[in-house]
Amino acid sequence: MGVSAAVLAVLLFYSAAAAVALAGHHDYSDALHKSILFFEGQRSGRLPPDQRLRWRRDSGLHDGAAAGVDLTGGYYDAGDNVKFGFPMAFTATLMSWGLIDFGRTFGGHREEARKAVRWATDYLMKTTAKPNTVYVQVGDASRDHSCWERPEDMDTPRTVYKVDPSHPGSDVAAETAAALAAGSIVFREADPVYSQRLLDRAMAVFKFADRYRGAYSSSLHDAVCPCYCDFDGYQDELLWAAAWLHKASRRREYREYIKRNEVVLGASESINEFGWDNKHAGINVLISKEVLMGKDEYFQSFRVNANNFMCTLLPGISNHPQIQYSPGGLLYKVGSSNMQHVTSLSFLLLAYSNYLSHAGAHVSCGGRTAPPTKLRQVAKRQVDYILGDNPLRMSYMVGYGPRFPRRIHHRASSIPSVAAHPGKVGCKAGAAYYASAAPNPNLLVGAVVGGPTDATDAFPDARAVFQQSEPTTYINAPLMGLLAYFSAHPNPAEWADD
């Protein structure tokens, strides 16, 4: 990018931000409540009496039975009826991280956020109950995706897939260990016994993941690909899990593991990515807190990596930006489901800004520096874009604001509920609802869709365009922490003068 183009990008970004400042204050607390409520719409298993999205009913009550195990519960990852363990574990880890870093700002929503985490961790405990085995998927993705039916009606094979010593899956096993370790911190005070169970299991699952190394997309390629192939290898998940186990247990063995394997497992690679498949940037931000808090200079290299990552995200700061921004101010990366990048990268910006603030530090990018408030500003701009401060003046969260997506790519939302239509809607019978131009009959409140995928800020609100209209749990998971923070600190003018 030439100098003039870079300047233009900065002007576009900050002119969009200025327009947002005039748009008015968002109800971040309401958006937070709705972002948590979304997870109730994704629940599998027997629903509890306090279920608030009443159009959903019990589903997947025999999951795992074919393999002689109980795999009921957990979350459907997106608009289908498969339970994919890899993104579900990442979802749980990010929900927990938000509660760990910003728990106080959740206010009255803290308990419902914990319940959302526990629905995932309870399931992950079931998937890891057998030593040296992790059940990583329930459902035949190919068969499921050929149908359009409610989870309450699904009659496609509920095939069970697992990783074990003969069929390793260090990536999904290590992410599961990370989720359990992070969850143990969330429940440390609220439920100490459960917290210890999570931590004990996390340590055992990590030991399995590290001892029997291999990618689960090699062991289970036909089952997990192309939906959730591990394209970036399992090495980052091993470091990520070790980092969470160190944070949860404070055991020296995990500290030594991280340092010993930092280069071998590629801590500094691909640091401009963060998501269910690539944990590099998250590893560096998480571990850098130890350095910035003055607890461990041993990890100084991770702080350097995190600093370099932040520079790639800040408009007008880096000479080598890795991220693009649309004319309306949206961070975007080429591909589908762009909001997963928006929420996860924004979460890292906010988390790191808080670590910097506590340390009285700044981000250094060559000859330029940025204070923590700059990182917060970029993160808040992304949240505001999602909530409606964009060229379409449309919220990308279902149920928030006067205008939001009505035709989301989601089976349960798009087919009349069991209460409204008690008769079964079979595999192919749901096709009429998929093809319909009518709005979805069931409001999946709080669901954030994939959103605009390029520089046009365009959104078709069409069920068939799943790349833009499908919600996922891992879009919402990091958003919870962001919304909690901005609900308590909505006004940039009142942020600390860094």
Image (tube, rainbow, N blue to C red):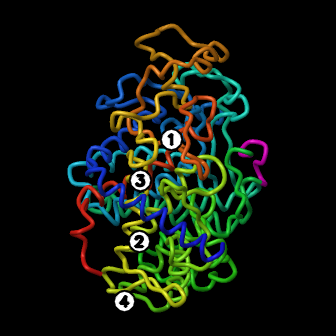
Q: Which residue is mark 1?
A: 449
Where residue 310 sits: x, y (%)? 50, 75
Q: Earlier in the sequence, mark 4 or mark 2?
A: 4
195 up-or-down from 451: above or below:
below
Q: Residues within 10 Å of mark 1 (few under 14, many from 20)?
A: many
Circle 1 sits in a helix, a strand or a loop, which is it?
loop
Which numbered disc covers residue 375?
Answer: 2
Q: Is residue 377 left or right of residue 495?
A: right
Q: Are marks 4 and 2 in contact (CB under 8 Å)?
A: no
Label 3 CA crowd tier, 10 Å (few <14, some 14–19, many 20+): many
**Residue at the spot of label 4:** 294
Instruction: Please state which of residues 257 and 129 is positioned toward the viewer in this rendering.
Output: 257
* Residue in front for this viewpoint, 199 or 392: 392
Circle nearer the N terminus (1, 2): 2
What distance separates the C-alpha of mark 4 from that of mark 2? 21 Å
Q: Residue 64: x, y in percent?
A: 59, 35
Q: Earlier in the sequence, mark 1 or mark 4?
A: 4
| Residue at mark 1 to residue at mark 2: CA–CA distance | 24 Å
The residue segment tinted magenta is 218-225
Does the magenta stretch mainly form a helix, a strand or a loop? helix
Locate residue 479, reporting x and y percent. 41, 53
